[in-house]
Image (spheres, grey):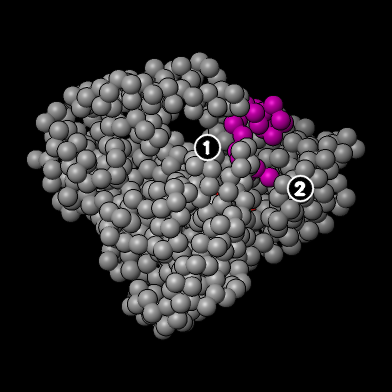
Amino acid sequence: MQTVRIARQGSVAVATIDNPPVNALGAALRRDLATAVTEVMADPEVEALVLAAAGRAFIAGADISEFGKPLAQPILPEVLDLIENAAKPVVAAIQGVALGGGLEVALACHGRVALPAAKLGLPEIKLGIIPGAGGTQRLPRLIGAAKAFPMMLSGEPVAAQKALDLGLVDRVVEGDLVAAAVALAQELAAKGRPRKTGEIAEKLTQADREAFEALAKDATAKSGDMPNAMALIEAVRGAFTLPLAEGLAHERALFARLVVDERSKALRHAFFAEREAAKVPGIDDSVKPRPIARAAVIGAGTMGGGIAMCFANAGIPVTLIETSQEQVEKGHARIRDTYGFSVKRGSMTEATREQRMALITPAVGIAAAAEADIVIEAAFEEMGVKREIFGALDKVAKPGAVLASNTSYLDLTEIAAATTRPADVLGMHFFSPANVMKLLEIVRPEGVAADVVATAIALGRRLGKVPVVVGNCFGFVGNRMLEQRTRAAERLLVAGALPHEVDAALTGFGFKMGPFAMSDLAGNDIGWRSRKSRGKTAAVADAICERGWFGQKTGRGYYLYPEGARAGQRDPEVEALIADVSAKEGVARRSFTSEEILARLLDPMVNEGARILEEGIAARSGDIDIVWLTGYNWPAWRGGPMHWAEAVGLDVIVRRLEEQAAESGDASLEPAPLLRRLAAEGKGFSALKAA
Ligand code: T1G
């Protein structure tokens, strides 16, 4: 199929790019674009060319799915050289997003016209790379390096008006974009040979260089460990120190090195995994979500308040329900304070805070949920409490209302059975802080209606979440795997490691916090209560809780938190307690390297992930990665636990698990059958097709 159609408007040729869904610059489009430019430039009747595009994107950039494979000719820089060196002017008509290579196409043009809704950006940094087709050379020439560098370092697009102010586009027009682009093309043609972006030098002044170097110094201090950020500095510096051709070659060499880096592979995996997670078996476009105009949240605690904020932030009126006026007012006040932090930081105006607070109506009693199209229960994590609430909801909620529980672990089928409408009941598991964390686990119990699942997915997106549909089991996906890491961390303490060593291994891997600091932050008593409710024990963790050392809220947990201390400090009493446990269990303590600690923490998680796939609790391994990337701060540039395991090698994971199982006598550490099979076949989880 032709990806570029050429038409004539008078003496100007209009080439319309049409490569659904987002006009990514795959091999066919690169070839058709080169052909179109060559043909138009050879046509004596044509005095100029406009590059337009069909669909919602101008050009979404290079085709990311081609990375890591041999690139078919022509490569993008060659196509852009054709455009920039054309004898007749080429003008870009930008109706939608012009991202990455898409903006680089526009930069190689001699003029740019955009609709007000268009957005222009170079997001390559988010994929672990840098612009690889002239962005680091042409953008600074057009708008100055001091403005171009921050755009490329953040990867955030700018709106058309901002692009106009920067000098990135020549005109922003309402109405007929192509006609406006044709007019500009004719004006440029009347001036003779078009001026190449690569020839523009007046913005690259000494002052601009100094401003850029200051920004580069700051970026080095902040992101010195990000190879692509450092490469970006080098490439942009080349715009000052090298002629265009050498600057382009230098940029391409830096880009080529980054594309093969594990970090970039992980970020590209996450890009596609997030989009794949949106494809839910049995829920296609034919399943229409139920309309949601108003919501209710049961429970005004930390989670309930955070969930209510999600609705208010999305402009959806929400009733916040508690059992007493005092409780609901306390929860309502906590929301106001939370918004207050944003107001203080300047990221929210007082007016916005008031608008959002006005959307949250505090109320007492379940009857206040009667008008809601969706009710999310965020009450105490105890089955009896939840069944009582859903039984009461069943009597007051309007027919067709979606009834969701924010439970972190519990059985949704059992909760649904407390109602006469189980097909309307599912889990919507938010992650704390609910108004911040992106992940929304949508738990799909047997018998839930397809349109109820579709409603939760659509609502999740409307709330700005990343919805991942998971099966109904204890802990679903994220917490079920987290429990394996928690047990592994406890085993490590008894075997000889200390809390700060275990935490340091994970923060060194890229997590913001390790398991013990995290437990002290959340409250050690939460895990203690959960273990007791299931008849489980953990010698060290239980001993710490029996002493009331619940963590930061009690001034000590695994660590000491002296008044005002920013971080926990080692506690000799805890370390003595740990040694006592080892002695009681007859374990000869030994030291562990960070690598050993990491393997012992993460391998059991991967093993549980394999079981989750075997049981169909997750449709694909990428969904598990997205759960950990968006719900647990798994380091983005490591791609998630299943992607990490694949990079390590499943055979290595299997061998280490067998060693751990033999050493600990814990059969649950034996490799899952799926893991063994894939390892034996020399494959990774990505070889599995969605269930
Ligand atoms: N390559 C391949 N496929 C892409 C793609 C891309 N660049 N962008 C989107 N898709 C697919 C996506 O996987 C999904 O597929 C469908 O299009 C719709 O996407 C040389 C080297 C453009 C803002 O980083 O930000 O250029 O699931 O669900 O919400 O220097 O997609 O339907 O099968 O996201 O409307 C730089 C990435 C590349 C932009 C549209 N460009 N894309 O959002 O739809 S590197 C990017 C986006 C580069 C140069 C360098 C968004 C979007 P499927 P979607 P959307």
At 60% across and 63% down in the image, what residue appears?
Answer: 501
At 70% across and 56% down in the image, what residue appears?
Answer: 225
Q: Give the class, few, some or many, for how many residues have Cα within 10 Å of label 2's Cα (few <14, many ≥20).
A: few
Which residue is label 2 attached to? 221
The amino acid sitting under disc 1 is Gly
Observer-nearest residue: 498 or 669? 498
Q: How far is mark 2 from mark 1, CA to CA?
A: 35 Å
- Which of discs 2 and 1 lies nearer the camera? The answer is 2
Numbered range of the magenta stretch:
153-173
Which residue is label 1 attached to? 96
Label 2–label 1 contact, CB within 8 A: no
At 87% across and 39% down in the image, what residue appears?
Answer: 210
Residue 461's x, y, as percent?
Answer: 38, 40
- Residue furthest to the right in view is 206
* Location of residue 50 (image quadrant): top right
The amino acid sitting under disc 2 is Ala
At 83% across and 43% down in the image, what residue appears?
Answer: 213
- Earlier in the chain: of badge 2 and badge 1, it is 1
